Image: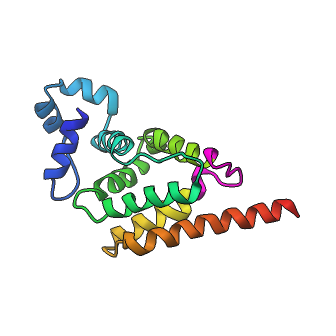
C-alpha cells in the first residue's frame, strides 16, 4: 500500500491521493486501508515517513556537525524535487482533523533524538531540530524559495550548534 501511495503521489499534480486508487493499485481491499489509516492524508504521511527512513536516514555517529550536515543536505535537496512537499501538505491537513500526525512522524522523531543522543547533545531535543531545521526548510520550500543545499545546510547546522553551545554555557553558570 505504501508503494502504491508513493507511486500515486508521484503522478498527482496536487499532492493528493484517493484511497480507492490506492486500493486498486495495491490490490488491498479498501476497507482494510480505511481501518488502518482512516484518511488519505494519514496514508500519505505513513508512506512518506516510511520512505524517508530508508531513503534519507539520520546518521548517529556521535559527530553532530557531520551527521546534521549530511542529513540536512539530503533534506534540502529532496525539497527541491517535485512531489516531496505532498508529505508536508498532508501533515498540515491531518493536523486539522482527527488524524494523529505526530503518531505517524514518531519513527522520524526517534531517529532525530538518536542522533542527538549519540552526540551527547543533552541540551537539545527533536523539537529543537524541528524548529531550527525542519520548519524553515519546509516553509521556504512551500513559498517556492527552497534553500540551497550547498550553502544553507552549513548555516542550519551552525544554528543548531550555536543553540547547543549557548545552552551548555548557561547550564554551566
- Identified at 13% across, 26% down, the residue is 27
10, above or below 2, in the image: below
Q: Nearer the viewer, residue 67 or 108?
A: 67
- Identified at 59% across, 64% down, the residue is 160
What's the image's color scheme?
rainbow
46, above or below 139, in the image: above
Total marks placed: 0
Which quadrant of the view contains residue 89? bottom left
Q: Is residue 123 left or right of residue 67?
A: right
Quadrant, the C terminus: bottom right
- Identified at 44% across, 60% down, the residue is 72
Say if the magenta span includes residue 6: no
Q: Nearer the viewer, residue 154 or 103?
A: 154
Residue numbers of the magenta segment? 117-128
Task: Residue 37: give x, y in percent of width and height.
Answer: 33, 33
Task: Residue 92: give x, y in percent of width and height.
Answer: 39, 55
Q: Is residue 125 left or right of residue 22?
A: right
- Identified at 35% across, 44% down, the residue is 45
Amino acid at each position: 500500500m505504501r508503494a502504491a501511495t508513493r507511486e500515486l503521489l508521484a503522478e498527482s499534480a496536487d499532492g493528493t491521493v484517493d484511497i480507492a486508487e490506492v486500493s486498486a493499485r495495491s490490490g488491498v481491499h479498501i476497507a482494510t486501508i480505511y481501518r488502518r489509516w482512516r484518511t488519505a492524508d494519514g496514508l500519505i504521511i505513513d508512506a512518506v515517513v516510511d520512505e524517508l527512513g530508508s531513503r534519507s536516514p539520520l546518521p548517529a555517529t556521535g559527530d553532530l556537525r557531520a551527521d546534521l550536515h549530511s542529513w540536512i543536505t539530503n533534506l534540502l535537496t529532496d525539497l527541491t524535487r517535485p512531489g516531496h512537499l505532498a508529505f508536508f501538505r498532508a501533515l498540515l491537513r491531518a493536523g486539522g482533523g482527527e488524524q494523529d500526525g505526530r503518531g505517524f512522524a514518531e519513527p522520524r522523531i526517534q531517529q532525530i533524538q538518536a542522533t542527538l543522543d549519540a552526540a551527547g547533545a543533552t541540551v537539545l531535543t527533536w523539537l529543537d531540530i524541528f524548529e531550527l531545521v525542519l520548519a524553515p526548510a519546509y516553509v521556504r520550500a512551500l513559498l517556492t524559495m527552497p534553500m540551497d543545499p550547498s550553502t544553507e545546510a552549513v548555516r542550519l547546522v551552525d544554528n543548531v550548534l550555536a543553540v547547543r553551545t549557548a545552552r551548555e554555557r548557561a547550564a554551566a553558570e
